[in-house]
Amino acid sequence: MKDAIAKAEFIKLRVEGKSYDFIAQKLHKSKSTLYQWNRKLKKEIDNMEFLLFQSIIEKYKFTKKARIEFLAELLNKALEILKAKDLNKISFKDLIFLIEKCEKCMKDELSHIIYHTGEYTKNFYDSIEDEFKEGSEIIDKLM
C-alpha cells in the first residue's frame, strides 16, 4: 500500500517535470528504483501528461473548434471590411494578406476532416471551398 502511494506521487512528480534527484529525496527512494518505476509506469506517466495538456488546451480555449471559429470570424470581418472598402483602419495590402492568411489557416485546420461513404471520400474543406471563392473573386475584382 505504501509503495502504491509512493508510485502515484512519483507519477505526479514526473509529470510536473521534477528531476530524479528531487523525487529521490522527496520519496526517500534510490534513483535506480525510480528508473525502474519510470520504465514500468511509462504509460501512466504519458497518460497523466496527456490529460494535463488537454486541460491546459481546454482552459485556454485553444481547441481545434475554437481555432476554426476564430479564423472563420476573423475572415468574415476582413471580407466585410473589404466589401465596404473601409480601408482607413488597415491598408489594402494588409487586408488582402489577412484574408489570404485566414483562408490558408482555415484550410489547414479543416483539411484532415474527411467524410466517408461507401462510394467516395470527401475532404471537409473541399465542401466549403466555394464559400471562400467569393472572397477571392472580390480580391480579383479590386486588383
Image (cartoon, rainbow, N blue to C red):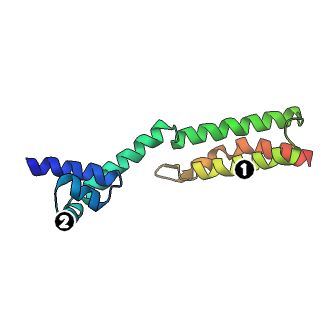
Where is residue 140? Give x, y as percent: 87, 48
Q: Can you tell which quarter of the image residue 86 is in?
A: top right
Q: Can you tell which quarter of the image residue 14 is in?
A: bottom left
- Residue 1 falls left or right of residue 101: left
Residue at coordinates 33% horizontally, 52% vertically from top-left? Answer: 15
Q: Mark 1 and mark 2 in contact (Cβ < 8 Å)?
A: no
Above or below 66: residue 15: below
Where is residue 124? Give x, y as percent: 58, 47
Where is residue 34? Give x, y as percent: 21, 62
- Residue 46 falls left or right of residue 63: left
Residue at coordinates 89% horizontally, 37% vertically from top-left? Answer: 87
Where is residue 119? Give x, y as percent: 50, 53
Q: Which residue is labeled 1 in the image? A: 101
**Crowding near pointer 1: few (<14 within 10 Å), some, many (20+)?**
some
Q: Can you tell which quarter of the image residue 68 is in?
A: top right
Q: As rendered, which of 11 and 53 lies closer to the eye? A: 11
Q: As rendered, which of 67 and 15 lies closer to the eye? A: 15
Could you tell me which secondary element the residue under label 1 belongs to? helix
Above or below 31: residue 140: above
Could you tell me which secondary element the residue under label 2 belongs to? helix
Residue at coordinates 68% horizontally, 52% vertically from top-left? Answer: 104
Q: Which of the labelled discs sits on residue 109, or is there none? A: none
Q: Which residue is labeled 2 in the image? A: 36
Of the numbered discs 2 and 1, the one sitting upstream in the chain is 2
Q: As rendered, which of 114 and 4 lies closer to the eye? A: 4
Name the amino acid, label 1: Lys
Q: CA distance from mark 2 to mark 1?
A: 48 Å
Q: Nearer the viewer, mark 2 or mark 1?
A: 2
